[in-house]
Image: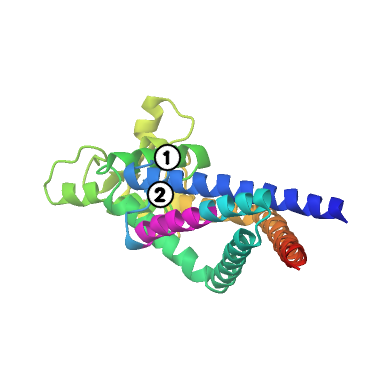
Amino acid sequence: MSACYGCMKYGVIYVALLFMVTGAAIVALSAYFLLEQDIYLEVAPEDEYLVYGRWFLIVAGSVMLIGGITGCLGGFKQSSSLLSAFFSIVLIISLAELAAGVYIYLNQDEFVKYFRTQMKNSVQNLYGVDEYRTKGWDLMQKGMHCCGATGFRDYSSNILQRQESQGIIDMRLSASSGSSYQVPKSCCGDLSDSQCESARIISITASIPGIGDVLASSSVYKEGCAEKFIEWMKSKTPYFVGALIGIGSVQILCLLFTCILICAYRSRRSTYKN
């Protein structure tokens, strides 16, 4: 019987160590993203959801870190009090994960709509103006073979195009005339510089739905990056589900083992007192 308790004890300690390492990593990464502008995360404009989300991750990571430390100490010291605290933290985290999963599933259409809106807003108002977001978009468009958020037409209303139409000097997306506009070089694909310069000039008529894809250069990516990213996420759904099931199973076993150890340590303490 003591061997079983020993296996449970070290099982709980290993899970607590995992909680501690994961919590520390989440806190460190969240703090970094708060202090530094990362080109991948800065593709979407800064808004309250992203700011609150980063602070939420810092709080969640801190709770996991504290829970991991508590679980390790409780396991090594065989303390029912510390293990009870660890049990409570793991239970709260598990319930929060379940609630978040249900909420995201029920509101997935709203999240997708919000994601598309933010991506398009970034293309139209920040590309060519904000250095980090511009680099992020260029990397995404080259890597995913896409152009703009919903398509190459998004650049017809880019802020630099609008400024040029108002007589303001354009530095990044200069159109050759009032009847055309340019998409970034990262939308060209594997073309030489000379070929790209010609291909990325898009006629205003190419922005008309229905005939635009015919008139636009075949060398320019036409699919939007938002849809590409959503499709990529959907293709990975089985892996995400599998990972969630695995994490949930480990947490349930951890709660069960912790509960058994708490009862065993309390029972042993009562026996010693008697």
Q: Where is residue 261? Give x, y as percent.
A: 74, 61
Please identify the quadrant where the N terminus is shown: bottom right
Residue 214 appears in the figure: yes
Q: Name the residue under label 2.
A: 148
Label 2 packing within 10 angstroms: few (<14), some (14-19), many (20+): many
Residue at left 52%, top 50%?
Answer: 23
Residue 257 shown left or right of residue 48 in the figure: right
Residue 226, which numbered label? none
Asked if the residues shown at circle 1 and circle 2 are in contact, with their CB atoms under 8 angstroms apart, the answer is: yes
Please identify the quadrant where the C terminus is shown: bottom right
Q: Where is residue 6? Give x, y as percent.
A: 79, 50
Residue 55 located within the stretch drawn in magenta: yes
Label 2 SS? loop
User: Which sits in the foreground, 35 or 83?
Assistant: 83
Q: Where is residue 11? Give x, y as percent.
A: 74, 50
Which stretch is magenta?
A: 49-64
Label 1 SS? helix
Q: Mark 1 points at which residue?
A: 187
Residue at left 56%, top 74%?
Answer: 106
Residue at left 85%, top 53%?
Answer: 2
User: Which sits in the foreground, 156 or 89?
Assistant: 89
